[in-house]
Image (cartoon, rainbow, N blue to C red):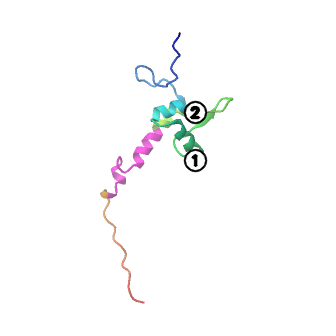
Amino acid sequence: MTARPSLSPIDSSGTVSAAFLNVKAAADYLGLSPHTLYVWRHRRQGPPSFRMGPRGRVMYRLEALDTWIREQEQADSRSNPALNPLNTPPQERPCRSLGA
């Protein structure tokens, strides 16, 4: 019995070996389920993807996944101090007159 070659984009040394990933490989890379990526694609959310080849397989560019991850980190107030509401000065409410 012969061993099947791994379809994973990450080789035995832990190095990524592909520029384009299919849905399963992209999901593995992101730590998500393939179903989540399909749902996000349908809703036009998540990392950018495209169809490749005559069969129109959904593919993800590894560079785009890394960029998308960085964007997610910057959009999260826990990772980006500039977005943390505790770092902004309190806003004053405008005075409202109580008379008519």
Image disc number at residue 59 = 2
Residue 73 spot, x, y in % from top left: 40, 44
Of all residues shown, which one is farthest toward the top? 1
| Residue at the image point whose x is 52% and y is 28% from the top | 19
Percent x, y for residue 25? 51, 30
State yes or no: residue 70 in magenta. yes
x, y percentage for residue 52? 63, 31
SS under mark 2: strand
Disc 1 marks which amino acid? Arg
Provide the residue designation for mark 1.
43
Queried whether the magenta region covers residue 100, the answer comes back as: no
Q: Quadrant of the C terminus?
A: bottom left
Inter-mark Cα distance, 2 to 1: 16 Å
Dot 2, how many residues are within 10 Å of its Cα: few (below 14), some (14-19), or many (20+)?
Answer: some
Q: Determine contact: label 2, label 1, CB under 8 Å.
A: no
Classified by dominant secondary structure, the portion drawn in magenta counts as: helix
> Quick check: 88 left or right of 6?
left
Residue 56 versus residue 99 in the image, above or below: above
Instruction: Report how many numbered discs are placed on residues in the image.
Output: 2
Instruction: Residue 35: give its label.
Output: none
Mark 1 burial class by Cα count in 10 Å: few <14, some 14-19, many 20+: few
Q: Nearer the viewer, mark 2 or mark 1?
A: 1
Give the image quarter of residue 11: top left
Task: Identify whether 72 is placed above or below 58.
Answer: below
Farthest bottom residue? 100
Question: Mark 2 or mark 1, which has the lower sequence index?
Answer: 1
Q: Amino acid at mark 2?
A: Met
Mark 1 residue element: loop
**Residue 72: x %, y % from top left:** 43, 45
Q: Residue furthest right?
A: 54
- The residue located at (37%, 75%) in the rendering is 94
Span colored in magenta: 67-85
